[in-house]
Image: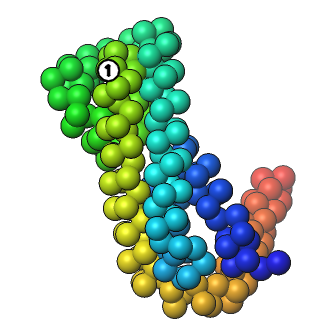
Amino acid sequence: MDISALISQYGYAVLVLGSMAEGETVTLLGGVAAHQGLLSFPLVVLSVALGGMIGDQVLYLLGRHFGGRMLRRYSRQHKKIRTAQNLIQRHPYLFVIGSRFMYGFRIIGPLLIGASRVPPKLFIPLNILGAMVWALLFTTLGYLGGEVVAPWLHDLDSHLKHGIWLILAVAIALALRWWFKRRSDKS
């Protein structure tokens, strides 16, 4: 079975699972796969949005139930956490939607939102909206990026072979260097 068949068969499940943990890279790759015709663009958007929603919902619930204890462990970051919680209280709509776009807040954002006691009736619809916007944006970027990497992907086998030979040559050079250095240290 070749890589294209694997992507076509398991791609959506991988996108859901991958976007629960690490979203941007997986979503961009989903967009590239859609550009290559291996996956459907709308289904890629839905898959990564679903994964993002589930992941953030779980983190939000963890924050609601264990947030206080979890945040106390980060006593050195107390000032930053307090600043984020103040932002959540003043602008909950923007923070819930925007936290997935803020560098460094992808994981901690939903935890902070849950610990800040934002009610589920507010968090859930905003989480869905934010996940859809985020999924559409990053899938589109991946799709457009697919135009750039498409010629390279068609020659992937030869690139992999060249890469393997390069890694092998570097490994041999490093082994020889180590061997000569060890030999000169013994003298």
Residue 177 visible: no
Query: Which residue is depicted at the point 37% across and 61% down?
Result: 136
Q: Is residue 126 above or below residue 44?
A: above
Q: Residues within 10 Å of mark 1 (few under 14, many from 20)?
A: some
Left or right: residue 168 compared with residue 87: right
Q: Nearer the viewer, residue 78 or 48?
A: 48
Instruction: Judge by depth and name the residue closer to the eye, 154 or 33.
Output: 33
Quarter of the image with the C terminus is bottom right
Q: Position of residue 162 (x, y in %)?
A: 68, 85
Q: From this view, report whether residue 172 is shown above or below residue 159.
A: above
Question: Can I make out residue 151 in this image?
Answer: yes
Q: Is residue 166 left or right of residue 28?
A: right
Q: Residue at x 67, y 73 (%)?
A: 8
- Residue at (56, 82) in percent of width and height: 37
The part of the image, by quadrant, that contains residue 139 is: bottom left
Find residue 15 and report its image quarter. bottom right
